Image: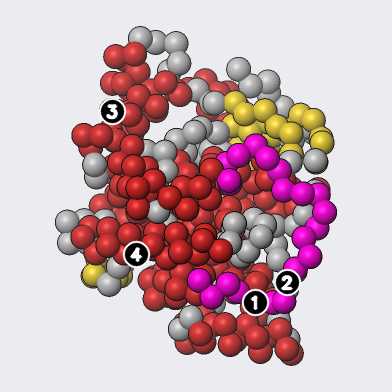
Amino acid sequence: MNKAHGFVMYGAEFSLYSGKLRSYLRKKGVEFTEIQPWLLTYKRFIVPRTGVRYIPVLQTPEDDVWQDTTVIIDHMEKRFPQPSVYPSTAKRRLAALILELFGDEWLLLPAMHYRWNYPEENQPFIYREFGQLLFPRIPAFMQRRLGKKLGDRFRDVVPRLGISRATIPALESWYEDLLGELNQHFRSHDFLLGAYPTIADFGFIGPFYAHLYRDPTPGKRMRESAPRVAAWVERMMSPQAVSDTPPVEAADEIPPTLMPVLRRFATEQLPVLADTARIVDEYAEGIGTDEVPRFIGMHRVKIAGVPAERLVLPYSLWMFQRPLDFWRSLEGEDRFRCTQLLEEIDAAGLFDIKCQHRLKRENNRLYLETSHPPASANSHLAKKPKAPP
Ligand SMILES: N[C@@H](CCC(=O)N[C@@H](CS)C(=O)NCC(=O)O)C(=O)O
């Protein structure tokens, strides 16, 4: 048990990335308190200390305040290295990094679709949750009204992710096939890469908990058609930590039942990442400023094989740099084995994407790596610790 008192997580049950962090802290056995941020917590603490309006946020006992689950997990891994969530062998580690990216950034599609496109069952539930979180002290009917106002901001993003009348049938059958593959996988394995959770599981649990398990419509479907996936969600969210003893890693092998899921990354997400890299490069060469915006226009992509228009998301590219950097750092036998893996999942051609302009994350914002954030970039962060309300 990683006993260090005083970690505080600001997060919500219905928030995708909060589920990822909560699961990580529990599996690592980190003791923490969770605070549900309401309106004033955002105003007085989250925004001044992080400069952005995202959850989850983790506050350390030393009063460092971190946002972004990937960054938080990497800080925590340095502090609590055992048992590591990063496999020590090359092929498994590459697969884990790819699957974190796939879970975080691509499984957002079914998550957002099922939450927002089944209004009768889901929306009263989710509007109430938004309202209760942000305005806990007002009457229920007002909570629902204000919760709707906030929820609709998320709902309005759905079509801009490429989820439309044209893509929905293919997206649903794609997701059902994925559920089937995972259900089959969890017949023989407790977690994605085998006997213990890795960063791959934490990438997947975000969309799979808050939206696909917990929201009424997709939750019912999952429990009925893929009960082993539902059982994995419950394992991932249970308070029980994994053992302190570092797991002895098996040979550097990927469970065969996981290969279809890795192929989905290669055929679906990878071409979108390649096009994002091209657009970020154009942006950097053109009028681009040092800070890279959250969205750079729209691009034509395919979703579940169907053409769609979608927002260009530079953050996904920042996440993609992780497996890419790891892959580029490899030599000899490790490089050979990972090349084989990429070939087996049909990713070899595209994986070595040219990212002429790398992205870096500073003060919770994205910048072109060749540039320096302006001196004023820190000025949006409060220096003095403030007590959360
Ligand atoms: N990639 C970030 C994303 C955080 C994020 O997008 N959080 C959502 C809730 S799950 C949020 O706060 N969104 C507010 C918004 O988009 O304005 C992470 O891993 O923490």
* Res 276 seen here: no
Magenta-span inclusion, residue 145 = no
Q: Which residue is tagged 3?
A: 124
Which mark lies nearer to you, 3 or 4?
4
Q: Are marks 3 and 1 in contact (CB under 8 Å)?
A: no
Dot 2: few (<14), some (14–19), or many (≥20) neighbours within 10 Å? few
Give 291 or 237, whichever is nearer the viewer.
237
Between disc 3 and disc 1, whose residue precedes? 3
Looking at numbered disc 4 in the image, what kind of residue is underneath it?
Asp
Between disc 2 and disc 3, whose residue precedes? 3
Horizontal side of 25 relative to 169 (left or right) equals right
Looking at numbered disc 1 in the image, what kind of residue is underneath it?
Glu
For residue 149, what is the image quadrant? top left
Q: Which residue is tagged 1?
A: 253
Magenta-span inclusion, residue 246 = yes
Looking at numbered disc 2 in the image, what kind of residue is underneath it?
Ala
Between disc 3 and disc 4, whose residue precedes? 3
Q: Are marks 1 and 2 in contact (CB under 8 Å)?
A: yes
Element class at badge 2: loop
Q: CA distance from mark 3 to mark 1?
A: 45 Å
Looking at numbered disc 3 in the image, what kind of residue is underneath it?
Pro
Q: CA distance from mark 1 to mark 2?
A: 7 Å
Dot 4: few (<14), some (14–19), or many (≥20) neighbours within 10 Å? few
Q: CA distance from mark 2 to mark 4?
A: 28 Å
Identify the disc placed on residue 131: none
Which mark lies nearer to you, 2 or 3?
2
Q: Which residue is tagged 2?
A: 250
The part of the chain drawn in magenta is: 235-257
